[in-house]
Image: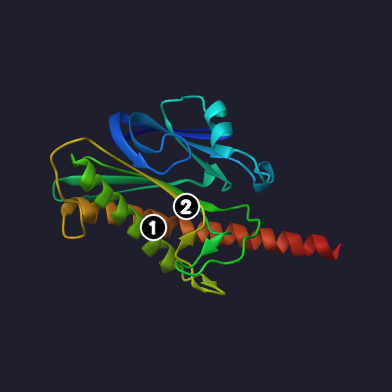
Amino acid sequence: MIGAIRLDRPWLSVRLTQPLRVLSWAPHGSGFRVTDHVLWREVRNADLTPGFDAEAWLAREIPDPEAVGMLTSRDIGTYDRGAARVGDVAAEAVVTLGLSNAEAVGKRLPWHSADYGTINILAVTDAPLTEAAQLEALSIAVQGRTAGVMDLDLPLATGRATGTGTDCLALACPAGAGRYAGLHTEVGEALGAAVRDTVSRAAPGWRDAARAARTAGQNAGQE
């Protein structure tokens, strides 16, 4: 399902082993799109000035216009990859994770500049699904993301972190007749496990990097 992964800064490129129907709210190629290519573009908040049209800029910059493209200020070299199989269904995930602009769902914090964030996820399953079932499968991937973040138990002024303000998920699968992809199904269990486990594994790396950055900043301020 997931083939080659290539890091060529500022791009992280993930190739699928065949064209699949991808559903996302990515800034490039959102909605349903058939492609075998998903790209991450690393940026910094300083690059995204007020009034800057990030979607138009990404459309000009992206090396493959037919790909699905996401943006992140997390170091793309920190990506994690995971997989799960339940019965006859396989699922895989590629995750870049930052939580510097973390939020607790239902009560947002005041806006603040936050490099080292966001969460971008590509989840893939070999289960052939209808468009409606793919929507349900995407909701399961989102639950996996949220559960993985909550496993980190990151406290905020508004509660426990459940994600960030700029998360993006893309869900790829073959088009087919499978009508259900909820938590009672093999595909739902496999997708949830692949995403949750990969997010849980990636989260401590972000926490350690954030602590190191804060310590470096404090030390610089004392010089």
- Looking at the rendered structure, the kind of residue marked 2 is Asp
Q: Residue at x 14, y 47 (%)?
A: 179
Could you classify mark 2 by the number of other residues whose Cα lies within 10 Å: few (under 14), some (14-19), or many (20 or more)?
many
Residue 210 x, y percent position in the rendering: 61, 60
Element type at marker 2? loop
Which residue was labeled with disc 2?
167
Where 160 sits versus 39, above or below? below
Q: CA distance from mark 2 to mark 1?
A: 10 Å
Q: Residue furthest right?
A: 223
Q: Residue furthest front?
A: 51
Residue 145, disc: 1
Residue 197 x, y percent position in the rendering: 35, 57
Residue 113, disc: none
Tags 2 and 1 touching, CB below 8 Å: yes
Q: Nearer the viewer, mark 2 or mark 1?
A: 2
Where 223 sits versus 135, above or below? below
In the drawing, does residue 126 fall left or right of residue 169? Answer: left
Residue 146 x, y percent position in the rendering: 39, 62
- Looking at the rendered structure, the kind of residue marked 1 is Arg
Q: Nearer the viewer, residue 33 or 218?
A: 33
Residue 221 x, y percent position in the rendering: 82, 63
Q: Nearer the viewer, residue 195 or 208?
A: 195
